[in-house]
Structures are given as C-alpha cells and as structure tokens.
Image (tube, grey):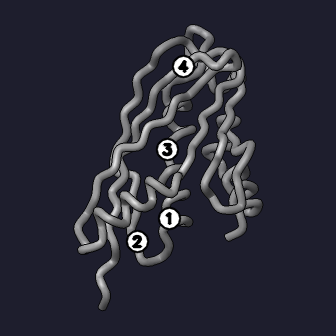
Amino acid sequence: MKAVWFKWLINCYPPYWGTAIRISKITPDYRYLRVEMPLRWYNRNYVGVHFGGSLSSMTDPFYMLMLIHNLGKEYIVWDQSGSIEYRRPGRGRVTAEFEVTDTLLAEIQAHTESGDKFIKPLSVDVKNEDGDVVAHVTRNLYIRRKQPR
C-alpha cells in the first residue's frame, strides 16, 4: 500500500480520529513516521492534561506497521507489549517520531535468519511543543521469519 493511502486510512481509523491522533508525516518507504495529537476536551484527563491512554495509543502500532512494510511478507511482526513512563504533564500538541534504519533491519534479519523468534524493544519519546519529553514509551516487538511450507 502506498504510504499516502496508509496515512489517510490511519487518520480516518475511528480510535485515532476519535482521540485526534494523526499521522502528520510518513516517507514513501515507511522508514520515518511522525504522529501528532493536540490537546482537546475529549482527550484530556481530570486535571486538564493529555490522558495517559491516548499518549500510549499514539505509539501503539507504528513500529509494527513500519517493520511489516520494510521486512516483507516473509516475516511475522507483532507488537507484543509496551510500557510507558510519564515524565511531565502533556499540554498542547504532542508528537512522536518513529524511524526504521538499515542497521535495525540488518539486526532483525541476522537474528531471525534461522527462523527463531526475536523480541526487539524499540523506544520512542512523546514530546511537547518545546521538545520536552512528556512520556518515554518502549514497545516490544515479536519478529520471526516465516518457515517455508
């Protein structure tokens, strides 16, 4: 799927549309992606800052989807687990930037060459408009090369 269609579909996906989470930039090769979320009345918590669940949701599928597109159909990629460390209250627009490098792809290919599973932790920071880290998120990805039939 072309990245422009992928961006449009994700931005229309009800869980993201309903929390104002949107992809603001994606490269055609799925190697870089930026997600944004403005603070709205419907995605803030009781004390008026970003709801923690929304901050976690804005990082949920993106490494998995980027790796699926870069590794190809011969790989199984699952977002196995995630953890989030809140560092400061999120106010205003927050962003998260994801990047898949050649080094990462080579590491994955080396660890899965024999068909073994590989659990790879990948981190991303959610930042406010001043560039301060609001939350540090780690996603653990399950990756395995499919076995020939």
Residue 79 at what x, y percent from top left? Answer: 40, 52
Relative to 111, 96 lies left or right: right
**Quadrant of the rendered structure where residue 48 is?**
top right
Residue placed at 55% from the left, 57% from the top? 66
Disc 4 designates what residue?
134
Relative to 15, 56 lies left or right: left
Residue 98 at what x, y percent from top left? Answer: 57, 43
Number of numbered discs overlaid on the protein picture = 4
Residue placed at 38% from the left, 68% from the top? 76
Front residue of 39 and 116 = 116
**Quadrant of the rendered structure where residue 145 is?**
bottom left
Q: Amino acid at mark 3?
A: Asp
Secondary structure at badge 4 equals strand
Quadrant in the picture for the C terminus: bottom left
Disc 3 designates what residue?
60
Q: CA distance from mark 3 to mark 4?
A: 16 Å
Secondary structure at badge 1 equals helix
> Which numbered disc flags the more N-terminal residue, 3 or 4?
3
Crowding around mark 4 (Cα neighbors within 10 Å: few <14, some 14 to 19, many 20+) is many
> Which numbered disc flags the more N-terminal residue, 3 or 2?
3
Residue 68: numbered disc:
1
61 vs 147: above or below: above
Q: Amino acid at mark 1?
A: Ile
Disc 2 designates what residue?
75
